[in-house]
Amino acid sequence: MAKVLNGTSIPNIPWEEKPASCKDVCWRSSHNPILTRDDIEDANSLFNSSVIAYKGEFRGIFRCDKTDMLPLLHKGKSKDGINWDIDDEPLKFENEVEGQRYEYGYDPRICELEGKYYIIWCRNSATSNWDPTLGMAWTEDFESFHLMQNPFLPYNRNGSLFPRKINGYYLMFSRPMAPNLPTVGSIYASKSKDLEFWGHHSFVMGPKGGWQSCKIGSGPTPIETDEGWLLIYHGVKKTCNGLCYYAGVAILDLDDPTKVLYRSKKYILSPRELYECVGDVPNVVFPVSTLCDADTGRIALYYGAADTYVGVAFTTVDELIKFTKENSL
Ligand code: BMA
């Protein structure tokens, strides 16, 4: 088994064995969709949400669009990672940051780094002229949340922070985009000494045919293994019926994650089930978060389905590495 580096033991990770008939690299939870609009008051949709292991339980930050259709972040708790108790009230921050107001918030990612939990999400606000950019905050207990400076200028989305410093720098992947080209976008890396000022921006990878022909964006916090960093990301394909969203995976160099060692030519998850194909935005699987048990290499992948539900799929570190190497672009 490939070794998970700097990982966490999660003996109670949500898990189901791969069905004997399944030939895919990921298989879905029999509880899917694990969250629907009925799990929170007055909701239109509950999707694109992130979870993390916390003191033997699980905590999460959820994207909920209420019936006014404004996307906001909500915190939630769970003992098993499948059944969640989500706050009906949106998340509030302890502090204010000059020049920023918390307005829309969506597509959160959570990363544990040096004893704190960082949340990176996409935000639109009057202070960024309603143009999307990344917001960032930290918490130690999932009770009080501390707002930080926005790491980047608009237009930007899909921020994934790495869970440790690499060669003296914090590292974040993001997806800058041009305002008038909403269907084009690549993954870039940025470095910081203090998690406040970001620079040394560099290109990591761009769209490349098939399911990832139009735009791509990084997903969950990358998983460190002795074979490299596992980066699960989304890829978009344009069809005559709109955009379809898929999940894929890349293996990145351990010392320099801007170097892509392998990248899956085939997707690992596609919109296939009814709850992925029918909803506010049909044909979307949008990976945002993983739990990974360092002892067994088991992975529970949390993804948004059709911009309406939260789904979970299972795989393992070994399955992902084998698949990516055997199907590399
Ligand atoms: C992206 C984001 C996601 C959404 C996806 C599919 O651009 O806005 O929140 O899930 O489109 O609609």
Image (cartoon, rainbow, N blue to C red):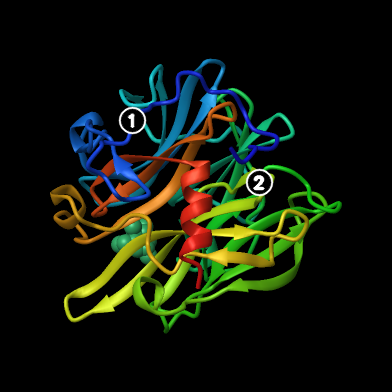
The residue under the point 46% across, 69% down is 216
Mark 1 burial class by Cα count in 10 Å: few <14, some 14-19, many 20+: few
Residue identifier under label 1: 17
* Quadrant into which the N terminus falls: top right
Q: Quadrant of ligand 1?
A: bottom left
Examine the rendered structure and indicate whether residue 153 appears above or below residue 137.
below
What is the three-letter code of the residue carrying label 2? Met
Q: Front-most of 20 and 258?
A: 20
Examine the rendered structure and indicate whether residue 93 appears above or below residue 216.
above
- Residue 324 percent location from the top left of the image: 50, 59
Left or right? Give the position of 72 relative to 308.
Answer: right
The residue under the point 33% across, 30% down is 17
Q: Secondary structure at mark 2?
A: loop
Distance from disc 1 to disc 2, alpha carbons, whole Å, reads 40 Å
* Pointer 1 or 2: first along the chain: 1
The residue under the point 65% across, 44% down is 225
